[in-house]
Image (tube, rainbow, N blue to C red):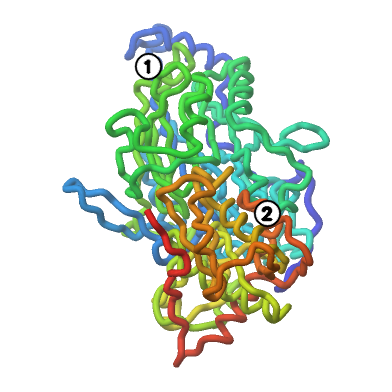
Amino acid sequence: MPAISQPRQSDAGRLRRRTYRLVAAAAGLATVGALAAALPAGAHDSKHGKPLPSRYQDVQLLSFNDLHGNLEPPSGSSGRVTELQADGTTKTIDAGGVEYLATHLREARKANGYSITAAGGDMVGASPLISGLFHDEPTIEALNKLDLDVTSVGNHEFDEGARELGRLQNGGCHPTAGCYNNEEFEGADFPYLAANVLDEKTGRPILKPYWVWKKKDVKVGFIGVTLEDTPGVVSAEGVKGLKFKDEVETINKYAKVLQKQGVKSIVALIHEGGLPASGAYNYNCDSPGAGDGISGPIVDIAKNISPSVDALVTGHTHAAYVCTIPDPSGKPRMVTSAASFGRIYTDTTLTYDRFTGDIARTAVKSANHVVTRTVAKAPDMTELIAKWNTLAAPIGNRAVGYISADIPSTGTESPMGDLIADAQLAYGKELDPGTDLALMNPGGVRAGLTYAAKGTEGDGVVTYAEGFTVQPFSNTVNLQDFTGAQLIKVLQEQVSGSNAASPKILLPSTGFTYTLDLTKTGADRIVVDSVKLNGTAIDPAATYRVATNSFLAGGGDGIITLGQGTNDLVGGDDLAALVEYLTANSSASAPIAPPTANRIAIVQ
């Protein structure tokens, strides 16, 4: 697409950054505020007759996570949330879209003079075409308009590497695509925090480790980290030259730094999460006791983070929860997550004690709220979306295939994942007719395909933009040789080792079948005798040609054996393989039907 590079302005000359809405008061006023904290509520300044601040000040913390560039309302199940009803039943609600998110956040702030908006990472990456095609500049623009104050980095902030993340923070035109609309990209008005992401050479964080929000005499510090295992879920090129440190160790370190600076109210933004026992956003995960209804990595993290940290905003698992999990001293502490794709936001009340400078933890309240589509759209977001859609339309609106029904991306074995695997098998056979099977990682399937028309293309039509939303990573399709014994080990690594607690079930191409017994543990979950290719048992000594994307071919998702294949052949773009498959195997009169998703027999 047309792109014109422009010289970058000096930092001193750039007038684009908004002055932070919330700034520190003068030292003299801060002193008055501190003294006033010791006085009873409603006390007056005897000299001027003005009321002094009360001891306690409610600070509103609005938060969300895992937006992934979803500026437009997500389609299908990705654009719905489940709500638990009083009678125990559930209903689904259409949700998401920054036009609505902006309206909800702005309305929530109206009655709160002390309001902060924070995020838990993965604002960009794995984005739909409207953002991903433009290296996520549209999403940063939208977040600036949302008045986001601060966010942690997530693993997807590293999809294009640390240098590109730095550009999103600081601005400047893309090194190869240049400038869009003949305008220099101005970067984020908010700080990205990366306390546990270090430059291997310097040993220092690549971005700010913490940030302090101030208004008058109220100060709240934020520490931002991503999951330590980011190298396991991002391509090797994206994390080259970086070191990822332990989340707990890092947060505790910077909590002490903040305390030494006089900041005692501290919130951790953690791009790691948990799995509540219910998928309903309003499920009470403290029933019957604190944190009893949630599992996953965030539980141990929360139990070990210093009690000096007052609340945790989390993400990564795309789940919605508001829980209290005991800190190391045994006291309950608020831990929240707002699902994904801008469908939910969390409203937390932090009660700031002016006398101690800390949060009164027993008074902290929090709730998740649906970003419904029944409110008015924010006009500035509508304008932003229209601008970028105009640029994307010539590419995004092109029809690439036809489907007969929704092809969902949900479930242990998703129909969408199976379809991608079939496409990669077909592409692999073009590269090498000896290709036997293909495997697709579930995290690479970002959405399903929806039969109902999203725009003017017509029902059942798949556009390039919809395909991009499904597979936005620009991986390549790679071929490797594995022995049958290695292939079985690959399947076992899905459900053992680092994947024992949260299995990463690969989606298989047609003809590759096996039984997954979830009543067992670890590698025993794979019933070895059931692993077959086209009805024939896998021979441990035979060689099989396997197609995967480049992420898996590098041993991604903790499936390290996939990084040990031989006779490597690197093919083309994985999205191009899907588009080619859809175009070749469907038409308006003969659309593709959703795969049955019966290649993995599941015992549970």
Tell me the residue at 42%/73% (across/down): 596
Tell me the residue at 60%/78% (across/down): 579
Q: Is residue 447 left or right of residue 196?
A: left
Asked which quadrant contains residue 40, the reply is top left
Q: Sequence-wise, which precedes: disc 1 or disc 2?
A: 1
Q: Is residue 243 visible?
A: yes
Q: Is residue 55 left or right of residue 548?
A: left
Asked which quadrant contains residue 363, the reply is top left
Q: Is residue 206 above or below residue 42?
A: below
Tell me the residue at 52%/44% (across/down): 500
Q: Which residue is mark 1?
A: 54
362 or 351: which is nearer to us?
362
Tell me the residue at 39%/38% (across/down): 294
Q: Answer few, some or many: residues within 10 Å of disc 2's Cα (few below 14, many 20 plus, some between 14 and 19).
A: many
Q: Which residue is mark 2?
A: 561
| Residue 455 place in picture, x, y as percent | 45, 76
